[in-house]
Image: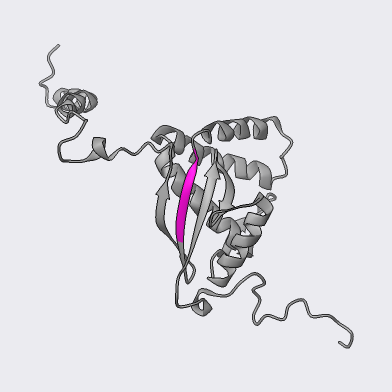
């Protein structure tokens, strides 16, 4: 109608970027710095969180990152189809996840992944001011004490590829995990395996009628 202002001048329905097939043929590299779990810099430039999201939105959008087409569950029960654009958030989430791989111990990382679902449900269901949300957030904050470092990502046609990760708080030690001569006494594994498998061994002996009483 005459006098109306178009919502978007971009072709199609995307507002923040392009589809992966229209992304550049050359990859884009981005480096993100974190301090105690918080993003603090992009490509060496210190900036506040809101500006980091804006910059990553631009880079991600240009490379077809962060497009999501899903059928989700509403609070009241019906299913709903949603198409989302979250280029900056998708990049930031992946970078943080990569850094946690080398800075969090296994048990903490697994529990954090489990509780993340409950935390997301609380927020989605409008319970931000609940006691449980505060408790879960306190746990999350504690897990980030050593999540400090730098992550380099390769953005290419809708894909996010890890290009490098470093941290002064890393739990990775090449001198321990190498199969060559190392600081780890590999002979210790024999006793550990025997103890770890003891319950299964006892059960097998019982089933074979060989368990000594």
Q: Is residue 91 left or right of residue 130?
A: left
Indicate the quadrant containing the C terminus: top left, top right, bottom left or bottom right. top left
Q: Is residue 103 left or right of residue 179?
A: right
Can you say whether 46 is above or below 177 in the image?
below
Q: Nearer the viewer, residue 154 or 118?
A: 154
Quarter of the view holding residue 83: bottom right
**Residue at point 58% right, 47% down?**
39
Residue 37 belongs to magenta span: no
- Magenta residue span: 147-153
Q: Nearer the viewer, residue 188 or 37?
A: 37
* Residue 13 visible (yes or no): yes
Q: Position of residue 84 (x, y in %)?
A: 62, 64
Can you say whether 125 is above or below 17 in the image?
above
* Residue found at the very far right of the displayed protein: 3
* Residue 86 visible (yes or no): no
Can you say whether 138 is above or below 11 in the image?
above
Q: Position of residue 98 (x, y in %)?
A: 44, 49
Residue 150 belongs to magenta span: yes
Q: Is residue 64 left or right of residue 167?
A: right
* Residue found at the very far bottom of the displayed protein: 2
* Residue found at the very far top of the displayed protein: 213
Q: Position of residue 110 (x, y in %)?
A: 44, 38
**Residue at point 66% right, 35% down?**
133
Q: Position of residue 9 (x, y in %)?
A: 72, 81
Quarter of the view holding residue 87: bottom right
**Residue at point 54% right, 70% down?**
64
**Residue at point 48% right, 44% down?**
149
- Numbered label tally: 0
Predominant secondary structure, magenta span: strand
Q: Nearer the viewer, residue 12 or 32?
A: 32
């Amino acid at each position: 109608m005459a006098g109306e202002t178009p919502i978007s001048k971009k072709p199609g329905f995307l507002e923040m970027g392009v589809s992966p097939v229209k992304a550049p043929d050359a990859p884009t590299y981005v480096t993100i710095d974190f301090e105690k779990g918080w993003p603090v810099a992009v490509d060496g430039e210190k900036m506040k969180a809101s500006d980091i999201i804006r910059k990553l939105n631009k880079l991600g959008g240009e490379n077809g990152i962060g497009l999501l087409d899903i059928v989700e569950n509403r609070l009241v029960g019906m299913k709903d189809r949603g198409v989302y654009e979250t280029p900056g958030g998708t990049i930031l989430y992946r970078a943080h996840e990569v850094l946690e791989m080398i800075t969090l111990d296994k048990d903490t990382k697994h529990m954090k992944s489990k509780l993340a679902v409950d935390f997301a449900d609380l927020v989605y269901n409008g319970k931000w001011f609940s006691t449980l949300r505060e408790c879960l957030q306190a746990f999350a904050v504690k897990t980030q004490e050593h999540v400090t470092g730098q992550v380099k990502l390769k953005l290419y046609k809708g894909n996010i590829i890890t290009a490098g990760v470093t941290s002064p708080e890393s739990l990775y030690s090449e001198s321990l995990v190498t199969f060559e001569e190392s600081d780890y006494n590999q002979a210790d594994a024999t006793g550990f395996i025997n103890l770890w498998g003891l319950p299964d061994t006892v059960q097998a002996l019982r089933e074979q009628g060989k368990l000594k009483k």
